[in-house]
Amino acid sequence: MLSLLYQAGPSTKGIFRRSGSAKTFKELKEKLDSGTEVDLARESIFVTASLFKDFLRNIPGSILSSQLCDKWVSVLDQGNNEEKIKSIQRWLIEHLPRAHVFLLRYIFGVLHVIEMRSEENQMNAFNLAVCIAPSLLWPPVSFTPDMESEFIKKISSLVQFLIENCCRIFGDEITSLFGEI
């Protein structure tokens, strides 16, 4: 999915914002869940993006770890950008499973490549963050609707910061994890 998003996402207007066919999404999700092989290259990239967000939402405790929710939210309250980046790198290395960090590198590599072509696809770091943040981190307990709205804004700001600074956080090589577009 990430490879397809890396290839088609930068040239697709509204990637992650628009959803594909609900019927196709449901059928493909059922096939994937049952272990049936699926050729996503034949499907709409919007369905693939929806499937990917669904995959992220189904990671137990979220890929950024709901247990660290307060820590992630507080990162942006720290000093300058350098301090924020160092804090994020420390949290990634010290508190997240290695597999999560590995997947996050690929996710942010894809988001970065999409954001680099935002004039074409209308998906700048802010727009991408609004669309993908709720799939990357959620609180361990339920919130009231007002609290949830405020939380989503904070997480979106964090994800926007991660997209804008991904090369400094994850290393410059994330821009070429999938090769050339």
Image (tube, rainbow, N blue to C red):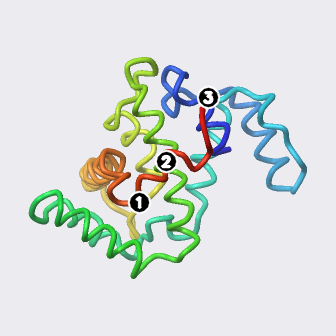
Q: Earlier in the sequence, mark 3 or mark 2?
A: 3
Q: Do the numbered discs 1 and 3 sit on residues whose CB atoms are within 8 Å?
A: no
- Looking at the image, residue 107 sits to the left or right of residue 75; the answer is right
Looking at the rendered structure, the kind of residue marked 1 is Phe
Q: Secondary structure at mark 1?
A: helix
Residue at horizontal 41%, vertical 28%?
123
Estimate the spatial distance between the alpha carbons at disc 1 and disc 3, rounded to whole Å: 22 Å
Contact, CB < 8 Å: mark 2 with mark 1? yes
Earlier in the chain: of badge 1 and badge 3, it is 3
Q: Nearer the viewer, residue 31 or 128?
A: 128
Q: Which residue is located at x 33 percent, y 61 percent?
A: 143
Q: Is the C terminus in the top left, top right, bottom left or bottom right quadrant?
A: top right
**Which element carries disc 3, helix, strand or loop?**
helix
Residue 120 spot, x, y in % from top left: 44, 17
Vertical position of residue 5 compared to residue 12: above or below: below
If you read the primary sequence from the N terminus, does the residue marked by circle 2 or circle 1 appear first? 2
Residue 23 x/y as whole percent = 75, 31
Per the image, the residue denoted by label 1 is: 170
Q: Quadrant of residue 144?
A: bottom left
Q: CA distance from mark 2 to mark 1?
A: 9 Å
The residue that mark 2 highlights is 109
For numbered disc 2, what is the local secondary structure?
helix
Few, some or many residues within 10 Å of mark 2 (<14, 14–19, 20+): many
What residue is drawn where x is 54% and y is 53%?
A: 106
Which residue does the image show at 77% across and 32% down from the upper left? Answer: 41
Residue sitting at the far right: 36
Disc 2 marks which amino acid? Answer: Gly
Q: Dot 3, crowdedness within 10 Å: few (<14), some or many (≥20)?
A: some
Residue 8's tag is 3
Residue 108 percent across, percent down from the top left? 46, 50
For marks 3 and 2, give the CA distance.
14 Å
